[in-house]
Image (cartoon, helix red, strand yellow):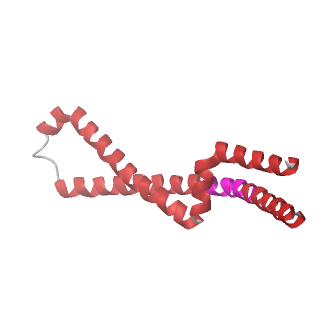
């Protein structure tokens, strides 16, 4: 016989799983520190690639002036400035990444709690049905 309350719980679980399936899975699998570290690592590499691409494009766009002044450039100062700008950029980028993913994790933690409550309630309903038989 169909249990209407159990069907409602299964429906709620299916809705949550369809809407938030991938993000809920990340939050059920990873601890907060692991989740944020994974995202920081991805952001470090993507930020570095982005910075190098932008730097390359800027150098290409100003190539004629660069070729004229190639002998006048103090490469030690140029390298120090380049590294300082890169470190400033990647630091700000990683701080922003940390804040965004920490907030996302906390937001999803509430949804995981709701999902777990539905699972517990469904489990109790199944246990009650087994006990009644």
- Out of 63 and 36, give the one closest to the viewer: 36
Q: Is residue 107 left or right of residue 130?
A: left
Magenta stretch holds residue 107: yes
Q: How many labels were placed on the picture?
A: 0
At x 60%, y 51%, the residue is 23
Magenta extent: 102-114
Q: Is residue 36 left or right of residue 123?
A: left
Give the main secondary structure, helix, strand or loop, of the magenta stretch: helix
Where residue 77 appears, as percent x and y from the top left, is: 23, 56
- Out of 111 and 71, give the one closest to the viewer: 111
Where residue 32 appears, as percent x and y from the top left, is: 59, 64
* Residue placed furthest toward the right: 132
At x 47%, y 60%, the residue is 38
At x 43%, y 59%, the residue is 41
Where residue 98 appears, as percent x and y from the top left, is: 54, 57
Where residue 60 appears, as percent x and y from the top left, is: 22, 35
At x 32%, y 41%, the residue is 54
Q: Quadrant of the C terminus?
A: bottom right
Magenta stretch holds residue 62: no
Q: Is residue 88 left or right of residue 119?
A: left
- Out of 130 and 61, give the one closest to the viewer: 130
């Amino acid at each position: 016989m169909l249990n209407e309350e159990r069907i409602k719980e299964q429906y709620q679980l299916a809705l949550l799983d369809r809407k938030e399936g991938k993000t809920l899975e990340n939050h059920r699998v990873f601890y907060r520190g692991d989740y944020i570290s994974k995202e920081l690592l991805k952001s470090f590499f993507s930020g570095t690639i982005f910075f190098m691409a932008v730097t390359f494009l800027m150098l290409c766009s100003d190539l004629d002036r660069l070729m004229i002044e190639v002998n006048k450039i103090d490469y030690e100062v140029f390298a120090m400035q380049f590294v300082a700008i890169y470190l400033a950029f990647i630091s700000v980028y990683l701080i922003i990444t940390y804040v965004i993913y920490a907030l996302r994790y906390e937001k999803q933690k509430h949804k995981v709690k709701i999902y777990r409550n539905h699972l517990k309630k469904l489990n109790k309903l199944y246990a009650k049905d087994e006990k009644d038989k």
